[in-house]
Amino acid sequence: MIDGGSNTNVPFWSTFRRMKLDEKEIRPNPTPIYAFEGTKARPIGDVTLPVTAAGKTLFVTFVIIDAPSAYNAIMGRDWIHRMDEETLTRCQQLAEDPSQQDQENGDQEPPTIEPLREEVLDPTDHEKRIWVGFLLSDAEVEELMKFLRNNADVFAWSHRDMPGIDSEVACHQLNVDPSCPPHRQKQRRFTPE
């Protein structure tokens, strides 16, 4: 995961073990790591590994954490900056920083970061829009749109589009202890005005 909000590059212990790296390479690290919600994790240690992305290889210091995660590793701000890249959360990709590219290429035009193309799936309802990749040719977009329009009945744009779903399958409920009755708290004002 590329996380512009993370100060630290983190590979998880399970990932480190699957990579079959030498545990002797791990250096002690007594500094705890704090997650965004305030929980504290004690690192196993630090390790420096080569990371190749976007055609560049950098040696990156990782803080190894033994914690469950949906990701193999988290790449933080320091690595992103050293790569001279920008994160595009909308496109979920890493893109080269145009200002850095301009400095390296002199007068050459820096590459532009193109957005996704917005397409209307249903011409009678402009709320039913989708986004398609900007690298697709017009012919590919037309073929994709034809396929999606032919299969538009499988899309659910709101819960009203899913009339046959049993409430046993999907139902919203609040996770509240039924033995605790609801209680309205007294309103608190901080200033007389």
Image: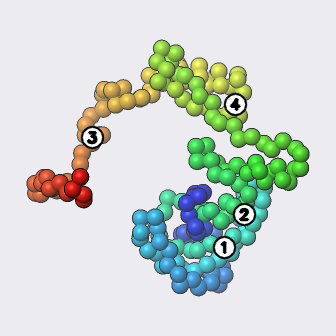
Marks 1/4: CA–CA distance: 37 Å
Under tag 3, what secondary structure? loop
Q: Residue at x 55, y 22 (%)?
A: 120
How many C-alpha atoms fall within 10 Å of the one at disc 3: few (<14), some, or many (≥20)?
Answer: few
Identity, as a three-letter code, of the amino acid under mark 2 = Arg
Q: Which residue is mark 2?
A: 82
**Given the current orientation, which residue lies at the most extreme front position?**
193
Q: Which residue is mark 1?
A: 61
Identity, as a three-letter code, of the amino acid under mark 3 = Cys
Identity, as a three-letter code, of the amino acid under mark 1 = Thr
How many C-alpha atoms fall within 10 Å of the one at disc 4: few (<14), some, or many (≥20)?
Answer: few
Q: Residue at x 58, y 47 (%)?
A: 89
User: Where the N terminus falls, by quadrant?
Assistant: bottom right
Q: Residue at x 48, y 63 (%)?
A: 69
Under tag 1, what secondary structure? strand
Mark 1 / mark 2, whichever is N-terminal: 1
Identity, as a three-letter code, of the amino acid under mark 4 = Leu
Marks 2/4: CA–CA distance: 31 Å
Residue 112 seen in render: yes
**Where, by quadrant of the figure, is residue 144 drawn?**
top right
Taking 160 as reference, is 107 above or below it? below
Q: Which residue is mark 3?
A: 171
Under tag 4, what secondary structure? loop
